[in-house]
Amino acid sequence: MRTASLRRNVVRLATAGVLSLASLGGIAAVAAPAASAAPADCAYNPGGRGGYGSYVDGLALNQMDWEQDLANAINSYRASKGLRSLAYSRTLARPAMWASLDSYNRGFSPSNHVDTRGMGIAQRVQFCSGYTGFVGEINYWGTGSQAYTGWQAALTWWKNSPGHNAWLLNAQATTFSVQMAYEGETRTRAHYTVVFGDH
């Protein structure tokens, strides 16, 4: 495991939630409702050690190891279908990471994409980053072998689900962020969130 990823994993363990024994995925896209808050309100801040703009927050926003691998695999899949690659978006990173960490803390990734604050996709994205407009999200979580096989299991599941696959191959999307939260160095539980946008 890469050093930065290990540090990130240790930080995430501070937010450990209940273990689950199943694998789920979800998809949704909605029009953005009104929301008002600063990106700081979605900064990852375990035990007061992080906060907006901190080193910990930066680790949560930068795509690393499996996140990069999954992002590259999504773009390769799109290229195989004649679609343009998606650009990494730091604007979409914080809401994507918030969703993954929130799912990690509750022990599952909700199929309706509503987080523990009661926010859906567009509201959470706007609340965490100020982004409005075209947006969509897919998620996946797995335990045991489904988590251990990492991003490959997530991508396979999405490709085999028509609704999720439609987002992977959405021609309107131009940007995205892939974020994951996981448990343990062997990643015995992993939660992935991909947020798609067009700016």
Image: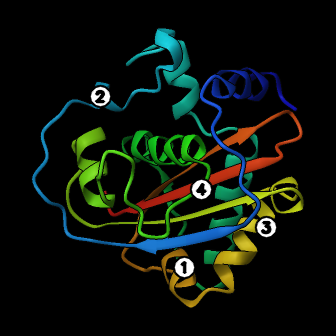
Q: Is residue 173 above or below residue 109?
A: below
Residue picked out by circle 3: 153
Q: Are marks 4 and 3 in contact (CB under 8 Å)?
A: no
Mark 4 neighbour density, 10 Å: few (under 14) some (14–19) many (20 or more): many
Quick one: SS at disc 2?
helix
The mark closer to the camera, 4 or 3, is: 4
87 relative position to 78: left or right: left
Mark 1 neighbour density, 10 Å: few (under 14) some (14–19) many (20 or more): many
Q: Are marks 3 and 1 in contact (CB under 8 Å)?
A: no
Q: Earlier in the sequence, mark 2 or mark 1?
A: 2
189 relative position to 81: left or right: right
Q: Earlier in the sequence, mark 1 or mark 4?
A: 4
Residue picked out by circle 1: 164
Residue picked out by circle 2: 41
- Identify residue type, mark 4: Phe
Residue picked out by circle 4: 108
